[in-house]
Structure formats: C-alpha cells, structure tokens
Amino acid sequence: MPGASTTFLTRRPCVWVSTTDTTTDDGLDLVAVERAANGLEPLPPLSDTEKVLAVRAMWRAGVSYEDMAVRADMLPRRVARWVAKEKQLLEEAPS
C-alpha cells in the first residue's frame, strides 16, 4: 500500500511506494519516489508530480515536515501547504 511504513531488512522504517511496476503509464518513476521518501542517497531528482506522491507517502508514514522538505527538495513551507491541502481534501471527501 503506497505510503505504508514498515521495517524491512534495513532495520529502520521504510515507506513503500512502488509496486511491481516501476513506472506509471504517464512516466512517473515510482522507484525514484520511493528512494526520496526513504531518504536513500543520492536523492533522485523528482518531477512536481513525483514530489506530490513522495510527500503524500511520507506524510502518511509520519515523516516530519523538515525531512519531507529535504527528501523532496522543497521548502518546508511548501510541504506544509501541500499537507494542509491534503488534509482539507480528506475532510471534504464524502464518507
């Protein structure tokens, strides 16, 4: 499940993003998103859409805003805005 956090082999929490497919039909690199979400260096450059996926996965896994910003190569205030928008969308979604 994207954004699920677990400990596996690395002895530290991992954020799982990719599936058996490493890219999507529209060219998103899920392996790069997963590497960024887990802070595996060297951190890959991400497109804006990949950054959204990485931040969403890290937020669901409880990663701090500061760590999200570093891993996604973003300003912390931008991460905070994206997370606030995500929270608002979840609150507005029909149950």
Image (spheres, grey):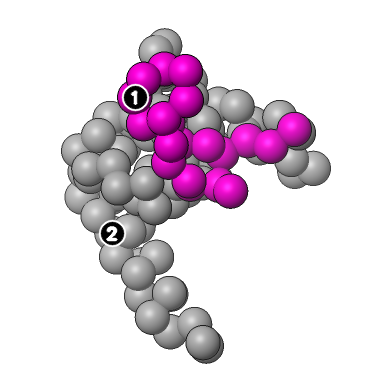
Q: Residue sitting at 25 percent across and 34 percent down?
A: 67
Q: In front here: 73 or 58?
A: 58
Q: Position of residue 5 (x, y in %)?
A: 43, 41
The residue carrying mark 2 is 81
Mark 2, secondary structure of its residue: helix
Residue 65 visible? yes
Mark 1, secondary structure of its residue: loop
Residue 16 placement, left or right of 67? right
Q: Residue sitting at 47 percent across and 25 percent down?
A: 8
Q: In front here: 47 or 58?
A: 58
Q: Position of residue 53 (x, y in %)?
A: 51, 46
Task: Inspect the magenta stretch and tell me whether residue 55 lies in it.
Answer: no
Mark seen at residue 12: 1
Q: Is residue 82 above or below residue 29?
A: below
Residue 27 visible? no
Q: Position of residue 24 (x, y in %)?
A: 74, 40
- Which is the main secondary structure of the residues drawn in magenta? loop
Q: Residue sitting at 56 percent across and 39 percent down?
A: 17
